[in-house]
Image (cartoon, rainbow, N blue to C red):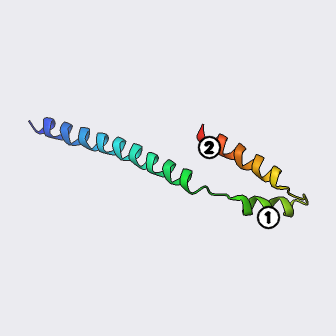
Amino acid sequence: MNWMILLWITLGIVIGIAIGFFIARKTMMSYLKKNPPINEQMLRVMLMQMGQNPSQKKINQMMKAMQKQQSK
């Protein structure tokens, strides 16, 4: 009888951890999609630091490439 209770408790904990992981993952992915960690201004500064003269076209291409990579 005691082993049955222990089994149910263990099973509940494992299922709870799995569900919590997937909920946290979905929430984090949604947050990162709405608030990307890098924006156009950051890209512009980064390119200027590397000695390149960033055009708006180049910035847009890089942003699209990052969004495409993130959606995979």
Badge 2 density bin: few <14, some 14–19, many ≥20, Cα 10 Å:
few
Query: Residue at (27%, 44%) from the top-left corner?
Result: 13
Q: Mark 2: which amino acid?
A: Gln
Mark 1 sits on what residue?
45
Q: Position of residue 27 (x, y in %)?
A: 44, 50
Disc assigned to residue 70: 2
Count of labels shown? 2
Side (left or right) of 46 relative to 71 = right
Callout 2 touching callout 1 (CB < 8 Å): no
Q: Secondary structure at mark 2?
A: helix
Between 38 and 24, the residue placed more toward the observer is 38
Quarter of the picture containing the C terminus is top right
Quarter of the picture containing the N terminus is top left
Badge 1 density bin: few <14, some 14–19, many ≥20, Cα 10 Å:
some
Q: Relative to 29, say whether 43 is above or below.
A: below
Residue positioned most to the left: 1
Query: Residue at (54%, 54%) from the top-left corner?
Result: 34
Q: Position of residue 11 (x, y in %)?
A: 25, 38
Side (left or right) of 37 relative to 17 = right
If you read the primary sequence from the N terminus, does the residue marked by circle 2 or circle 1 appear first? 1
Q: Secondary structure at mark 1?
A: helix
Q: Which picture quadrant has residue 36?
A: bottom right
Q: Which picture quadrant has residue 21?
A: top left
Q: What is the C-alpha distance between the residues marked 2 and 1?
A: 21 Å
Between 29 and 34, the residue placed more toward the observer is 34
Q: Position of residue 52 (x, y in %)?
A: 90, 57
Q: Mark 1: which amino acid?
A: Val
